[in-house]
Image: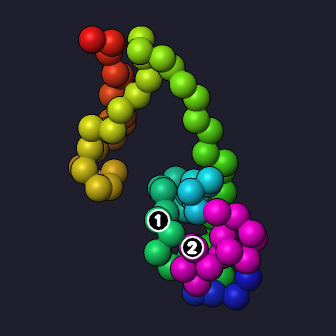
Amino acid sequence: MQGPKQVRAVLGELQLLPETVLVIRNDALVTEDELVADTDTIEIRPVISGGAGRSGGIEWSGGADWAGCAGRSPWTPRHAV
């Protein structure tokens, strides 16, 4: 594909809904409004979701991005109450 293009345009050409996939470039998540160059290699993975009931699951504990995580996952276990 010729670039640069926004990720949402690439996904549109591939007939993929942005809500159904994760786009990864250089081991980092890429948002749908970011530009990718035609020289970039991106990985597109399907989003997989499953219910864990009241006894488990994960919950976002970070900010709007992964930048402040310092090598740790921003996802933390959710415990039943």
| Residues under numbered marks 1 and 2 in contact, where contact means CB atoms less than 8 Å apart | yes
Q: Is residue 13 magenta?
A: yes
According to the picture, the residue beneath numbered tag 2 turns out to be 7
Q: Position of residue 5 (x, y in %)?
A: 58, 84
In the displayed structure, 76 sits above or below 68; it is above
| Image quadrant where residue 17 sits | bottom right
Is the N terminus in the top left, top right, bottom left or bottom right quadrant? bottom right
Give, as a three-letter code, the residue at label 1: Thr
| Residue at x-position 35% and y-position 32% | 59
Residue 40 rendering spot, x and y as whole percentages = 61, 73
Query: From the viewer's perspective, is 47 left or right of 63?
Result: right
* Residue appearing at x 25%, y 50% in the figure: 63
Q: Which mark is residue 1?
A: none
The residue range painted magenta reads 5-17
Residue on which disc 1 sits: 31
Residue 32 in view, yes or no: yes
Residue 1 in the figure: left or right of residue 66 = right
Residue 81: x and y in percent read 27, 11
**How many neighbours does mark 1 have within 10 angstroms: few (below 14), some (14-19), or many (20 or more)?**
some
Separation of disc 1 and disc 2 at Cα? 7 Å
